[in-house]
Image (cartoon, rainbow, N blue to C red):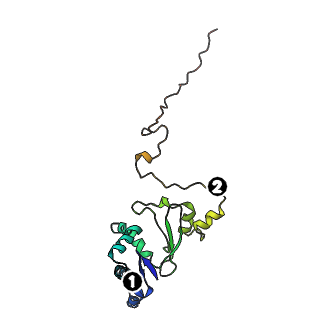
């Protein structure tokens, strides 16, 4: 039993329709899995509205960030994929890391749900979680932080290069640097003049 947006989805919701997918081609199987997931989501939403009432359901959906899913297909897919997944940990930025070991293709069974729902990129994942997310190590970010000596830890910052001109680094001589230095201080070489004797 797992939950999505405050409503519960049991494994029986999806197993009712699993029997029709047996020998079909992989593409049809994937379409069937999507329709099964969507059917389970719709059924769970409807049951939750009946149990909690519409206003409580909408409040919970807003608090969990599900309304931001509607225009963003990637976030909606992540929320649907979270059904039946295990929350492995949360990093210092609030990103949530999930793992789903059954019914998922190997290599796609670990993923991150970013804390900033409207604006996210891969540089928001700190290095200790990057290794776990990309199967470099099986130790989670929390376990790696316990192993590292505190003296060597540098706080992770995301890459702001695409976030506006004021956040982009410009070297001292760059034309767009507000504190631009004039590098014309050079003296040309002049040969020594020999004294006539």
Count all numbered tags in the image, as a single digit.
2
**Where is the C terminus found, in terms of image quarters?**
top right
- 101 with respect to 48 (left or right): right
The one nearer the camera, 50 or 96, is 50
Please state the horizontal and vertical placement of residue 86, each as a whole percent of the image: 51, 76
Residue drawn 46% across and 63% down? 115
Label pair 1/2, CB-CB below 8 angstroms: no
Q: What element does badge 2 sit on?
A: helix
Instruction: Name the residue carrying label 1.
Output: 29
Q: Quadrant of residue 136?
A: bottom right
Please state the horizontal and vertical placement of residue 160, each as a whole percent of the image: 45, 52
Mark 1 crowdedness (10 Å alpha carbons): few <14, some 14-19, many ≥20:
some
- 101 with respect to 119 (left or right): right
Which label is found at residue 152? 2
Residue drawn 42% across and 76% down? 4
The one nearer the camera, 33 or 148, is 148
Sequence-wise, the earlier of marks 1 and 2 is 1
Q: CA distance from mark 1 to mark 2?
A: 48 Å
Mark 2 crowdedness (10 Å alpha carbons): few <14, some 14-19, many ≥20:
few
């Amino acid at each position: 039993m797992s939950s999505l947006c405050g409503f519960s989805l049991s494994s029986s919701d999806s197993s009712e329709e699993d029997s029709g997918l047996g020998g079909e081609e992989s593409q049809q199987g994937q379409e069937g899995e999507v329709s099964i997931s969507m059917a389970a989501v719709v059924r769970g939403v409807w049951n939750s509205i009946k149990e909690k009432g519409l206003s409580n359901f909408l409040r919970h959906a807003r608090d969990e960030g599900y309304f931001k899913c509607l225009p963003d297909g990637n976030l909606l897919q992540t929320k649907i994929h979270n059904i039946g997944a295990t929350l492995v940990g949360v990093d210092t930025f609030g990103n949530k890391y999930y793992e789903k070991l059954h019914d998922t293709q190997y290599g796609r069974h670990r993923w991150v749900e970013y804390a900033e729902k409207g604006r996210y990129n891969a540089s928001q994942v700190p290095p200790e979680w990057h290794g776990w997310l990309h199967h470099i190590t099986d130790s989670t970010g929390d376990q790696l932080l316990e192993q590292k000596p505190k003296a060597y830890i540098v706080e992770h910052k995301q890459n702001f290069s695409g976030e506006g001109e004021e956040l982009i680094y410009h070297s001292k001589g760059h034309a767009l640097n507000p504190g631009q230095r004039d590098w014309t201080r050079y003296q040309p070489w002049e040969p020594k003049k020999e004294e006539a004797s």
